[in-house]
Image (cartoon, helix red, strand yellow):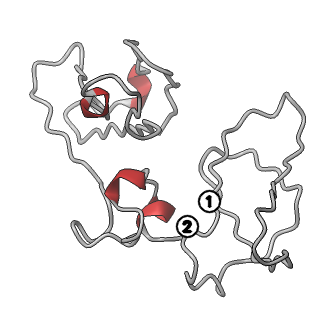
Amino acid sequence: GHYLGRNPSGARYFAFDRAELKPGGDNVLSVLVDNMGHNQEERPDASKEPRGLSSATLLGSSEPIAWRLRGDRGGERIADTVRGPFNNGGLYGERHGWSLPGYPDGGWRPVALPRRTTRAGVDWYRTRFTLDLPTGQDVPIGLKIEDAPSHHYRALIFVNG
């Protein structure tokens, strides 16, 4: 396979290299759409705006396209019953509850940070910590991530799910 690129929003054409296609054979096109959740603006019906892949056309082919969608694990029986289906992004780890407290991560390999990889994909990191905060006080806490501006990535941070 080959990564064709990304598109923050709007229309874009992605060209395939003919050498990568199998004429007369089975070709698979996969699209990962990360829509960052539903709009929560105050204008009427903003939350009802479409999400996902709203239109896709395979140019140069007269064959119909039949898309398949991979959603949450378990269908209507979601792993995160507290936050519900609208706060699940569809990544494998999200669908399987990797961000949830109590997930059995004992089989995960320990890793030291900083960690660099040259491969494309998604990496999940988990840690546990205990806070010693005064009772009955609103105490701000934060997470500081330091990295060079030239290292491009996006991080989703889950705290207790």
Q: Which mark is residue 115?
A: none
Q: Nearer the viewer, residue 15 or 96?
A: 96
- In the picture, the disc for residue 158 is 1
* Residue 66, position as x, y percentages in the image: 14, 38
Q: Residue at x 47, y 38 (%)?
A: 36
> At x 29% / y 54%, what residue is drawn?
70
For this rendering, which residue is in front, 118 or 17?
118
The answer to the question of whether label 1 and label 2 lie on touching residues, with beta carbons closer than 8 A, is yes
Q: Quadrant of residue 103?
A: bottom right
Is 104 above or below relative to 93? below
How far across and down, in percent of the image, does residue 64 sit?
9, 28
The residue shown at (57%, 84%) is 102
Give the left or right position of residue 96, taking residue 65 as reference.
Answer: right
Q: Residue at x 75, y 44 (%)?
A: 118
Q: Position of residue 52 (x, y in %)?
A: 31, 35
Q: Secondary structure under badge 1? A: loop
Q: Which residue is mark 2?
A: 161
Of residues 111 and 62, the one drawn nearer to the viewer in this rendering: 111
The image shows residue 50 at horizontal and vertical percentages of 26, 30
Report the side of 37 relative to 100 (left or right): left
* Looking at the image, residue 86 lies above or below residue 158: above
Q: Secondary structure at mark 2?
A: loop
Q: Is residue 111 left or right of residue 71?
A: right
Q: Amino acid at mark 2?
A: Gly
Q: To which quarter of the image does residue 15 belong?
A: top left
- Which quadrant of the figure contains the C terminus? bottom right
> Is residue 154 placed above or below 87 in the rendered structure?
above
User: CA–CA distance between discs 1 and 2?
Assistant: 5 Å
Badge 2 density bin: few <14, some 14–19, many ≥20, Cα 10 Å = some
Tell me which amino acid carries mark 1: Phe
